[in-house]
């Protein structure tokens, strides 16, 4: 199943192989190696002792199509876990099932067990409103509400009744904006439209909005994919700071980003979780041939 | 080696063809736009040229005497005396004094026809408003008959139309004109009175009030119902065969000829629920049925155009579906919904066919004061006047059309303005 001979170039991962056009004759073989069998278990350290969130045998379906196959993994408290993988590998789908955003997708079905602090998130009596206050989310495209900067950040606390007074609310807004390192840039224009900010500022505003309700976990779905390198660097810096207080799961297309910000990295492939290991190990000594093939840029 | 050169030649050839096709296409478009504009221009020129005259009407100056014996009245507070009083005698006597040479029954009758047959009642109203005038005389401008009005206007325009006047009447008018005792004044009657069989006394106030009452009811009913239906269908309804069926039917309803809604209203509201005929309640209900599909469809489109990222952001913050709709979707969709509602209202304002079916086509002189008073509406009033034989109604019809069109223009402009004003960008 896994003939090491099929990929001669695995021996020198440093070469920037052009994945799109390998040698003509090698193509069928190369394709073959990208397949993954049903009973192949995830490689690496999936589980921790005291997980913040634990997922067991998670399957996600869109109508009849299965998007996630039997994924089991833990996320530890205050860790940053990066989820990487080629397009369509199910990493975003998996992320969105962690705060039940998939509930809003017609025909989407989640099987298996997803727990936070031992509590089943898919239990019938659990209210998604409470869940989403505990598990915040930052989306791929910055999506501030078409309201003022202040109102954007104040929305969550108002919604959940977290502020007792106007002063309280002001404080929460300032604290959240400071944590998102946006305060200095916007303190003079808190009551101007949030949509008037630059892309990077908008995304930091979205992060401020998410942390204003003090969630325990923050899910980030490719938060930098619409941003330029400078804005990306700021967000990455921010993620590092936030990891002191929050547990963060981040989906990213950029392997460099995963390497820079995360403690552990999970590699997804065609809906399966292939490998989970400390980030350093994944990028220096990948345990699985597919992980290696992906991080060396042979496909993706 | 010659192949690339050949390709280049081919491309150049096809380029010419493509450029010509594009030019032609642009011309088609331009011509289409010009035809449309020309049609609008012709329409407006025609209506305005016919209707502008109706905003002025001919008055003549008479020396009237509020003689108690002549009218047969001595107490202005006695309703019976007021009712039996010979009010028309006042202008008649005044006319005889103005033209003392006129004698003979026929000539006198022609002479009396110079003033409107409502002139006496106008003078009565004036007397009631100023009781001290009783027994005195004054010089006053009195409304003329519509035939005099038509002739005088056409004569001023250089194309006298005297078909319905005798030679003597024409002479009298010219005498009055030479003495400066006949003139055109602003026609306030047009805006303050209800319908009348006499063109010079007919106004659109009744129809405007009827339209207003009907539209208020239509808006109050169709906007909340339409918006609620749209929100439910877009945000809450499960996507299944039933909702597809409902969607198809709503779209079909929007295309149902409006007279069918009139028949429906006749069968349900009048024959089954026994609501009286000709009243704005029934009109409003029928027009609600008619505008509902329009409002539902435009509201759904407005809701659909709210970007999904905003919904996700709200849900991701822990907003419930109801809060997501109320806090984010509705404010963003509101401009579109309002535009739809105003356009629906404009449609309802211009509608006459369904109202014919429920009796709002009746000849109603009184100005309706409430939702249960018999009324007619502007387009039906236009239909009624266009159907009337008197020549003076031609310009009245056009004037009513101008009023209706200006209401429609105001409504559509406000729709655009509202959308611009409330629109938020993201």
Image (cartoon, coloured by chain):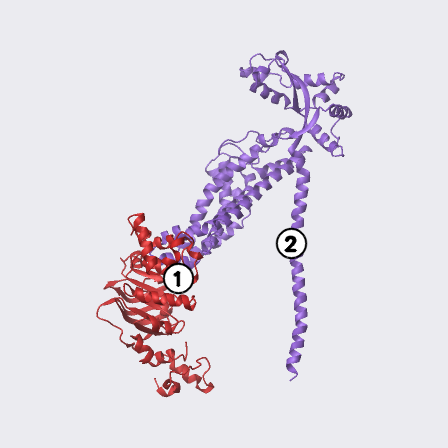
Quarter of the image with the C terminus of chain B is bottom left
Count of numbered tags: 2
What is the quadrant of residue B17 in the picture? Answer: bottom right
Q: Is residue B256 visible?
A: yes
Mark 2 vs mark 1, CA separation in Å? 45 Å
**Vertical arrangement, residue A22 with respect to residue B161, above or below:** below
Q: Which residue is mark 1?
A: A203
Chain painted in purple in the figure: B
Label disc, if present, on residue A143 of the rendered structure: none
Chain painted in red in the figure: A
Chain of the residue where label 2 is placed in the rendered structure: B
Please identify, in this view, whether the residue under mark 2 or under mark 1 is nearer the observer. 1
Chain of the residue where label 1 is placed in the rendered structure: A
Mark 1 surroundings: few (<14), some (14-19) or many (≥20) residues within 10 A: many
Q: Which type of secondary structure does the marked residue at label 2 adopt?
A: helix
Q: Residue at x 41, y 72 (%)?
A: A87
Q: Is residue A39 visible?
A: no
What is the quadrant of residue B44 in the picture? Answer: top right
Residue toward you, B351 or B55: B55
Image location (x, y in percent) of residue B412: 55, 46
Q: Which type of secondary structure does the marked residue at label 1 adopt?
A: helix
């Amino acid at each position: 199943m896994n003939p090491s001979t099929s990929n001669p170039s695995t021996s020198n991962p440093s070469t920037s192989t052009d994945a799109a056009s390998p040698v003509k004759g090698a193509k069928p073989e190369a394709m073959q190696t990208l397949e993954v069998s049903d009973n192949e278990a995830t490689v690496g350290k999936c589980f921790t002792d005291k997980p913040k969130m634990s997922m067991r045998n998670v399957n996600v379906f869109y109508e009849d199509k299965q998007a996630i196959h039997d994924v089991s993994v833990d996320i530890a408290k205050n860790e940053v876990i990066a989820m990487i993988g080629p397009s369509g590998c199910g990493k975003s789908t998996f992320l969105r099932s962690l705060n039940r955003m998939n509930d809003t997708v017609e025909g989407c079905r989640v099987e298996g067990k997803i727990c936070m602090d031992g509590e089943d998130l898919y239990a019938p009596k659990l209210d998604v409103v409470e869940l989403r206050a505990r598990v915040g989310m930052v989306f791929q495209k910055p999506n501030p509400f078409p309201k003022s900067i202040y109102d954007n950040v104040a929305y969550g606390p108002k919604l959940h009744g977290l502020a007792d007074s106007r002063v309280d609310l002001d404080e929460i807004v300032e604290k959240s904006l400071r944590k998102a390192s946006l305060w200095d840039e916007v303190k003079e224009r808190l009551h101007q439209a949030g949509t008037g900010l630059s892309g990077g500022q908008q995304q930091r505003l979205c992060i401020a909005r998410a942390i204003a309700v003090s969630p325990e976990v923050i899910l980030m779905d490719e938060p930098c994919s619409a941003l330029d390198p400078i804005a990306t660097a700021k967000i990455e810096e921010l993620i590092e700071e936030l990891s002191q207080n929050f547990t963060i799961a981040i989906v990213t297309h950029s392997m460099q980003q995963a390497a820079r910000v995360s403690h552990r990295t999970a590699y997804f492939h065609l809906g399966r979780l292939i490998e989970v290991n400390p980030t350093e190990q994944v990028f220096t000594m990948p345990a699985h041939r597919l992980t290696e093939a992906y991080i060396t840029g042979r496909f993706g | 080696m010659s192949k690339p050169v050949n390709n280049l030649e081919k491309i150049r050839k096809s380029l010419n063809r493509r450029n010509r096709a594009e030019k032609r296409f642009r011309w088609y478009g331009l011509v289409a736009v010009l035809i449309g504009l020309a049609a609008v221009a012709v329409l407006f020129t025609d209506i305005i040229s016919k209707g502008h005259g109706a905003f002025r009407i001919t008055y003549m100056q008479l020396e009237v005497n509020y003689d108690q014996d002549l009218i047969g009245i001595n107490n202005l507070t006695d309703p019976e005396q007021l009712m039996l009083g010979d009010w028309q005698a006042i202008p008649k006597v005044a006319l005889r004094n103005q033209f003392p040479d006129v004698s003979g029954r026929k000539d006198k009758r022609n002479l009396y026809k110079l003033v409107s047959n409502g002139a006496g009642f106008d003078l009565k109203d004036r007397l009631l408003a100023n009781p001290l005038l009783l027994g005195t005389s004054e010089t006053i401008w009195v409304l003329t008959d519509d035939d005099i009005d038509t002739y005088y206007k056409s004569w001023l325009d250089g194309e006298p139309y005297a078909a319905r006047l005798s030679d003597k009447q024409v002479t009298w008018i010219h005498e009055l004109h030479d003495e400066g005792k006949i003139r055109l004044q602003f026609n306030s009657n047009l805006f303050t009175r209800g319908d009348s069989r006499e063109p010079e006394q007919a106004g659109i106030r009744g129809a405007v009030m009827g339209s207003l009452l009907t539209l208020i009811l239509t808006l109050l009913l169709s906007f909340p119902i339409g918006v609620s239906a749209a929100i439910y269908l877009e945000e809450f309804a499960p996507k299944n065969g039933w909702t597809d069926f409902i969607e198809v039917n709503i779209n079909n309803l929007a295309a149902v000829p409006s007279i069918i809604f009139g028949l429906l209203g006749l069968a349900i509201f009048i024959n089954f629920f026994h609501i009286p005929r000709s009243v704005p309640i029934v009109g409003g209900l029928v027009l609600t049925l008619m505008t509902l599909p329009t409002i539902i469809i435009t509201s759904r489109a407005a809701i659909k155009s709210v970007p999904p990222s905003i919904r996700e952001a709200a849900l991701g913050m822990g907003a419930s579906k109801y809060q997501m709709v109320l806090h984010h979707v509705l404010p963003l969709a509101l401009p579109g919904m309002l535009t739809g509602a105003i356009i629906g209202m404009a449609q309802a304002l211009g509608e006459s066919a369904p109202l014919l079916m429920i009796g709002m086509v009746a000849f109603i002189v009184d100005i309706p004061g409430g939702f249960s008073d018999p009324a007619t509406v502007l387009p039906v009033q236009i239909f009624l006047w266009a159907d009337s034989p008197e020549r003076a109604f031609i310009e009245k019809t056009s004037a009513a059309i101008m009023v209706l069109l200006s209401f429609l223009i105001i409504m559509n402009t406000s729709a655009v303005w509202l959308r611009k004003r409330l629109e938020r960008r993201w």
